[in-house]
Amino acid sequence: GAGVSQSPSNKVTEKGKDVELRCDPISGHTALYWYRQSLGQGLEFLIYFQGNSAPDKSGLPSDRFSAERTGGSVSTLTIQRTQQEDSAVYLCASSWGNNSPLHFGNGTRLTVT
Amino acid sequence: EDKVVQSPLSLVVHEGDTVTLNCSYEVTNFRSLLWYKQEKKAPTFLFMLTSSGIEKKSGRLSSILDKKELFSILNITATQTGDSAIYLCAVVTTSGTYKYIFGTGTRLKVLA
């Protein structure tokens, strides 16, 4: 595809349910990042994948959050037992490699009721 | 702790005005600084700066980096309503892995 694709664009879920957010990066991009953006806040780093290296998970806020990247391409961010404070826009970005501009998807707006 | 601070937090101007947005940073292992424009959804890339004193320019937008004083500015001349957006600054650092640390952004509103 031409750009980074994220799905779903919107997700409303009940507190306590699990959700999966998907990111399809630009073809050939080796680096993939997940960020969270809450209302009025900057982008909060969650996790980073680079090629076949072990991911940098240092930004994940709790063990309810996990992510994987299969085959060096598509990534899934999973949030288990969602809480209301998880409500935010989850942005995925990819790049050619280290120290290159990030290209963002349109995000998934998650609302936990 | 690495941090990126943007100012002002918000700004309202009239069409035709010139604006200057600021981004200061305190990080270890600086690699580059990037500016993004975020209108409704995806932030879109504007500039990447790695060297001090070299201005990057695109149309009415320009940006410069000062690595001694640890800041960058983004200038927009002859503003238009289409410039209304959140402008994000990010600094790339390396501490084992490459991290892009974002500021909270400056919300710019341009009135007709």
Image (spheres, helix red, strand yellow):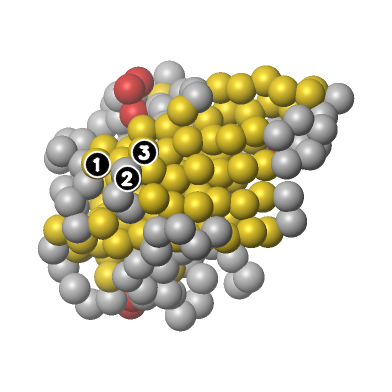
Element under label 1? strand
User: Residue B3 at what x, y percent from top left?
Assistant: 26, 38
Marks 3/2 same chain: yes
Residue B63 visible at all:
yes
User: Residue A72 at what x, y percent from top left?
Assistant: 33, 75
Residue name at image x 21 percent, y 36 percent: A61
Residue type indicated by callout 1: Glu
Do residues under tags 2 and 1 come within 8 Å of each other at their CB atoms? yes
| Chain for numbered disc 2 | B
Residue that numbered label 1 is attached to: B26
Residue name at image x 30 percent, y 50 percent: B68
Residue name at image x 30 percent, y 62 percent: B31
Residue that numbered label 2 is attached to: B70
Determine crowd level at label 3: few under 14, some 14-19, many 20+ residues with C-alpha closer than 10 A.
Answer: many
Determine crowd level at label 2: few under 14, some 14-19, many 20+ residues with C-alpha closer than 10 A.
Answer: some
Q: Earlier in the sequence, mark 2 or mark 1?
A: 1
- From the viewer's perspective, is the residue at label 2 or at label 1 nearer? 2
Element under label 2? loop
User: Residue B93 at what x, y percent from top left?
Assistant: 25, 56
Q: CA distance from mark 3 to mark 2?
A: 6 Å
In the picture, the disc for residue B24 is 3
Do residues under tags 1 and 3 come within 8 Å of each other at their CB atoms? yes
Residue type indicated by callout 3: Ser
In the picture, the disc for residue A87 is none
Determine crowd level at label 1: few under 14, some 14-19, many 20+ residues with C-alpha closer than 10 A.
Answer: some
Looking at the image, the residue that sits furthest to the right is B112
Residue B42 visible at all:
no
